[in-house]
Amino acid sequence: MEIFRAVHALAASAIGLSLFTIMSYDAQREEVERVYTNMPDVYPIGGRKRKRGTAWANQVLQDLKPFRAETTQGIREAFDDHAVMTGMGLGSILNIPVAYDGVCVGTMNMTHKEGWYTGRHEEMGVLIGAFLAPALIQCNMMHADSVARL
């Protein structure tokens, strides 16, 4: 979708990033699915992750609060795929919940060198990520339709 590319460009310019992904969130299945990535060889579109009962899921998907880890240790503590990220030289991460009507519909995720992200980046990320809500709602509706046909 064009909006994904536009938000990616804006986030790269305003906040800074190396890896950028957008995930849709299926609350019933407690699962996220990658719908956009700037590194498809490493993080392909369609990749899914179960996000049930973790501190990250509670903070981002339920409480709608950004998650920020400024060090590789913070990434290791929160993500199963930490070795992939840190192996690429990525050492800080910022996950922005995207919500509509108080419900999470997805996340905007930026990863960069260690020590990059700050509270100011969180604030900018929340504003930028809000532009993704309509497109993520559409992704979730299309996914629900395809599941219903099975």
Image (spheres, rainbow, N blue to C red):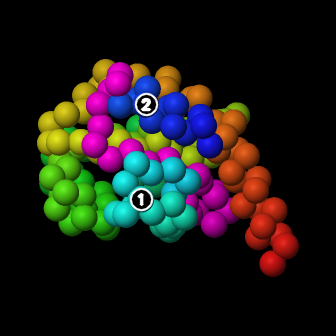
Mark 1 crowdedness (10 Å alpha carbons): few <14, some 14-19, many ≥20:
few
Mark 2: which amino acid?
Answer: Ala
- Decide if residue 121 is on the left or right side of residue 47: left
The residue to which callout 1 is attached is: 40
80 shown above or below 74? below
Q: For residue 61, say whether it is visible.
A: no
Can you say which quadrant of the picture contains the C terminus?
A: bottom right
Q: Nearer the viewer, residue 77 or 88?
A: 88
Q: Residue at x 68, y 51 (%)?
A: 139
Q: Residue at x 70, y 53 (%)?
A: 140
Q: CA distance from mark 2 to mark 1?
A: 16 Å
121 shown above or below 141? above
The magenta segment: 13-33
Q: Nearer the viewer, residue 122 or 38?
A: 38
Q: Residue at x 62, y 43 (%)?
A: 1
SS under mark 2? helix
- Decide if residue 48 is on the left or right side of residue 134: left
Image-quadrant location for residue 137: top right
Mark 2 crowdedness (10 Å alpha carbons): few <14, some 14-19, many ≥20:
some
Image-quadrant location for residue 15: top left
In the rendered structure, find residue 9 and report the number of the disc placed on it.
2
Q: Residue at x 35, y 31 (%)?
A: 12
Residue 27 painted magenta = yes
Q: Position of residue 109 (x, y in %)?
A: 41, 44
Q: Position of residue 116 (x, y in %)?
A: 19, 34
